[in-house]
Image (cartoon, rainbow, N blue to C red):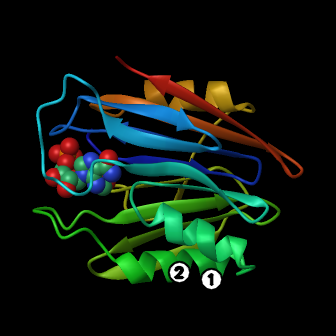
Amino acid sequence: MYIGRFIVVGPEIAAYRVSSRSFPNREIVERGDTLTVRPTAEAPESDNPYISYNCVKPGGDSMVVGNGSHVDPIAEKLDLGYPPRDALVSGLFALDYEKDDYDTPRIAGVVGEEAYIGIVRRDALLVRSVTEPTLVATYEKDAPESYDFAATDAETAAEAVYEADFEHAVAAAGVSRSGDEFERAVHNGN
Ligand SMILES: NC(=O)c1ncn([C@@H]2O[C@H](COP(=O)(O)O)[C@@H](O)[C@H]2O)c1NC=O
């Protein structure tokens, strides 16, 4: 099954997987405390505005994960002291679904003292508190659902979503939390 990009968010753990049929030549790189998705050196030129962005970024005392440029304003709202629910609603609503051929939804999560997951689709905006690992994806699984996820550290979280049984894996990121401390990890396929 192809579900596109997806995130898994729990109170102490989060992960993001880039899956892509159309733009497989991509990687995740670490830039300071932020993880960024970008085309590899071999990737053909593209003017698609949605394929390069920060996918993991700190905001306030929390960490944001997501599939596009909305990650930045969500992190900025957290820096300003917005509660995570409000930061997610604000960032997802402001940027809305992507104006591509698929009306691709934006998905995001916040891991911290409070954990939330959200998606903005053409027909809905859903933001939900999470108490156990929860998945949401751009396609097919486009409403938050409980996800059986055993990873407890960033590296195994990234590896587990990369290996998950959904088609067209490209790259993955993992985040783990211990109090106010976060670890990040990257698992690139190429
Ligand atoms: N975030 C991403 O990495 C990303 N990769 C592709 N998209 C969008 O989704 C469309 C479909 O891509 P694909 O066939 O690879 O699933 C692309 O044309 C692009 O507009 C993305 N946008 C949202 O997920």
Q: Secondary structure at mark 2?
A: helix
Q: Which residue is mark 1?
A: 86
Task: Provide residue 106's location: percent of width, then percent of height.
Answer: 37, 65
Three-letter code for the amino acid on which mark 2 is drawn: Val
**Residue 149: quadrant of the picture:** top right
Residue at numbered disc 2 = 89
Which residue corresponds to the image point at 42% horizontal and 48% vertical from the top-left? 6
Instruction: Check the image and report above or below for 171 versus 107.
Output: above
Q: Nearer the viewer, residue 14 or 149?
A: 14
In the image, residue 135 sits, relative to residue 40, either above or below, namely below
User: Mark 2–mark 1 contact, CB under 8 Å?
Assistant: yes
Is the C-beta of the residue carrying label 2 under 8 Å from the nearest atom of ligand 1?
A: no
How many numbered marks appear? 2
Residue 83 position (above or below residue 51): below
Label 1 residue near ligand 1, CB within 8 Å: no
Q: CA distance from mark 2 to mark 1?
A: 5 Å
Badge 2 density bin: few <14, some 14–19, many ≥20, Cα 10 Å: many
Which kind of residue does numbered mark 1 sit on? Answer: Asp
- Picture quadrant where residue 128 is located: bottom right
Residue 107 x %, y %: 43, 62
Q: Is residue 4 visible?
A: no
Residue 43, visible in the rendered structure: yes
Residue positioned most to the top: 190
> Looking at this rendering, what residue extends furthest in the right direction?
179
Q: Which residue is depicted at the point 86% across and 52% down?
A: 180
Using the image, determine if residue 156 lies above or below residue 140: above
